[in-house]
Amino acid sequence: MEIPDLDILRSRALALWEAHGRETPLPGLFLAVSDISTGPIHSVYQPSFCAVLQGAKVSQLGERSYRYDSGKCLITSLDVPIRAEIVEASAEAPYIAVVLNIDPGVVAELMLEQARDALPAGPDPAALSVHPLPPDIVGPLERLMALAARPRDIPVLTPMIRREIVWQLLNGPQGAMLRQIGLADSRTARIGRAIAWVRENFTDTVSVPHLAALAGMSPATFHRHFKAVTAMTPVQFQKRLRLQEARRRLIVEGSDVAQIGFAIGYESPSQFSREYRRMFGAPPGRDSAEIRRNVVAATPV
C-alpha cells in the first residue's frame, strides 16, 4: 500500500499543538509532539487509533515490542499498561502523532451496517497491532483537525467524521482486530471485562477464578487467552497497574514511600521498593524526586 502524503496532516497537527497542546478542542482527539527522543514512558493505553505523521515510537506490551513510524498506525483494542519510548525525534523533524479514541459502541453500530455473516473464531488478537496508515483515513483526519478553526461545527461534525474513520478502519486490513472491540461476546471483549475489574480493584489480590468467571471462561482457558492478548499473566498485569499508580502518587502527593506501597496493595515495603526499581530503574523516593526536579528545571521562569 502506498504511503499517503502526510504534509497537510503534519501542518494541521503542529498548528493544533501550538494552539492547544496535547488536548485538542475536538472530543476524543489528542496530539503527541516531541523534538527529542525520550526515555521510558509508562502509561495505560485505551482503545484507540494512533497515526504517526513524523518520527518513530516503540511501545512495549509485556515482552512484545511494537515499532511504528511515519506512515504507520497503532491500533489498541483494550486498556493495557504500556512502556513506550519516542525513538526518532529532533528539532528539525519532531515526532508528531495523532491519537483518536475508539468508542466500542460506534464500532458495534457500524458492524451492523456491514451486514456481514458471522466471522469464524480465529487466534486471539493481541491488544496492540501496527499497520500502514490507510490512504482513505488521511482525508477524514485532515477534515477533523480543520474543525478546530470552526467551533460551531465541532459538536455536529466531529461525531460524523469519527464514525467515518472507524468505518474505513473496519473495512481495512485492521478490521478483524477492530471488530473485536465492538463484539460484546468476543474473547477480546470478555478479557476486557476482567481487565476493567483489575483496573478498578488493583489493590485487591488477583483471583484468576473470579476473573475467569467475569469473562465467562474456565480458569485455564482464561489464563491462556489473557496472556495471548496482553502478553502478561493477570498477576503481572496487576503489578504494572499498581506500580504506575504508585509512581503517579509519589510525584503528585510526595507522600511517604512505605505508606504509598501499603495504599496500592503491597504488604512489604522492601518488596514494593524492589519491584518499583525493577520497573522504573530507580528506588521510588529517588525516582520521584528526580522527576520533580526535571519538571521544575523545565518550567519557564
Image: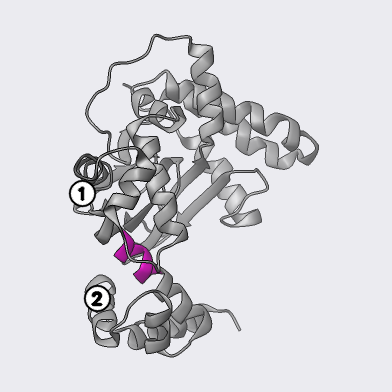
Q: Is residue 301 magenta?
A: no
Rendered residue at 29%/38% (across/down): 217
Indicate the position of residue 129 as horizontal and vertical percent values: 30, 37
Rendered residue at 25%/86% (across/down): 270
Task: Tell me which amino acid carries mark 2.
Answer: Glu
Q: Is residue 91 above or below residue 51?
A: below
Residue holding disc 1: 64
Q: Quadrant of the N terminus?
A: top left
Q: Secondary structure at mark 2?
A: helix
Indicate the position of residue 34 as horizontal and vertical percent values: 44, 59
Indicate the position of residue 173 as horizontal and vertical percent values: 33, 22
Q: Nearer the viewer, residue 144 or 92?
A: 144
Q: Quadrant of the C terminus?
A: bottom right
Query: Image check: 148 left or right of 211?
Result: right
Indicate the position of residue 19 as horizontal and vertical percent values: 66, 54
For label 1, count other residues whose C-alpha is less than 10 Å away and answer few (under 14), some (14-19) or many (20+).
few
Quarter-of-image position of residue 76: top left
Rendered residue at 69%/42% (across/down): 148
Query: Image check: 192 left or right of 152?
Result: left
Q: Main secondary structure of the magenta part?
A: helix
Query: Image check: 163 left or right of 90?
Result: right
Quarter-of-image position of residue 130: top left
Magenta span: 238-244
Q: Is residue 2 above or below residue 201?
A: above
For label 2, count other residues whose C-alpha is less than 10 Å away and answer few (under 14), some (14-19) or many (20+).
some
Quarter-of-image position of residue 233: bottom left
Can residue 72 be seen in the rendering of this structure?
Answer: no
Can residue 298 be seen in the rendering of this structure?
Answer: yes
Task: Tell me which amino acid carries mark 1.
Answer: Arg
Report the disc number at residue 275. 2
Q: CA distance from mark 1 to mark 2?
A: 20 Å
